Amino acid sequence: MSQKYRTNLFFNGVSSFKAAFPQLDDALIEWRELRGPEDERQTEMRRTGHKRGNFNQGVLPCGNSVCHEGGYQLDRLINHMLVLEEMEREGTLLCSGREVGEEVKRGPVRCPHRIHFKVKLVPRGEGSAPGDGQRRSRGRNRRRRPAA
């Protein structure tokens, strides 16, 4: 896993997805990480998103163990899509980090890892099923019916 890749939260300094993207209900992201441009492995697609609860800091960490300050800046991608009024996009993102391992003799080298991704943005109000506006209980704090 990449070492520390970002000190602040989302790109505009806010602390949550909702604050960064108030016009969105969710951002659904599928991706497959590759080790470099020649890597043609068919690995399993992974998924993330705000409502899945694993959209951390707007950045996916890089899987390269010698990568420093790397990761895939999904928050910047989402912001760019909103500026262009795109709701879906497919493409490739390069890791923003650099390799600093002992085998790198001439100094830091750009991390070769990349992801192939598919992003679907869900505008606020469109992705909600009937009743989604209500809080869902997971069995806690339920009112019990009095015994008759």
Image (cartoon, rainbow, N blue to C red):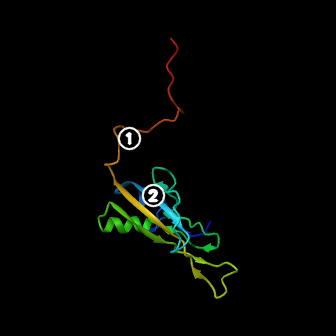
**What x and y, as percent, mark residue 41?**
53, 65
**What x and y, as percent, mark residue 131?**
36, 37
Residue 33's disc number: none
Q: Is residue 45 above or below residue 134?
A: below
Kindly state the secondary structure of the residue where label 2 is placed.
strand
Q: Residue at x 40, y 60 (%)?
A: 119
Examine the rendering and report whether any part of residue 3 can be seen: no
Structural crowding at the residue carrying mark 2, measured as other residues with C-alpha within 10 Å and reported as few (<14), some (14–19) or many (≥20) = some
Is 84 positioned to the left or the right of 111 in the image?
left
Q: Amino acid at mark 1?
A: Asp
Is 55 positioned to the left or the right of 65 in the image?
left
Residue under circle 2?
30
Residue under circle 1?
132
Q: Is residue 143 above or below residue 95?
A: above
Examine the rendering and report whether any part of residue 126 can be seen: yes
Q: Amino acid at mark 2?
A: Glu
**What x and y, as percent, mark residue 47?**
48, 55
Structural crowding at the residue carrying mark 1, measured as other residues with C-alpha within 10 Å and reported as few (<14), some (14–19) or many (≥20) = few
* Spatial CA span between label 1 and label 2: 23 Å
Q: Who is closer to the viewer here, 78 or 21?
A: 78
User: Among all residues in the image, which is located at the extreme left?
Assistant: 85
**What x and y, as percent, mark residue 120?**
37, 57
Kindly state the secondary structure of the residue where label 1 is placed.
loop
Q: Who is closer to the viewer here, 142 or 34?
A: 34
Q: Residue at x 58, y 78 (%)?
A: 98
User: Among all residues in the image, which is located at the extreme bottom?
Assistant: 106
Q: Who is closer to the viewer here, 23 or 90?
A: 90
Is 51 positioned to the left or the right of 100 in the image?
left
| Quadrant of the frame with the N terminus | bottom right
Is the C-beta separation of discs 1 and 2 under 8 Å?
A: no
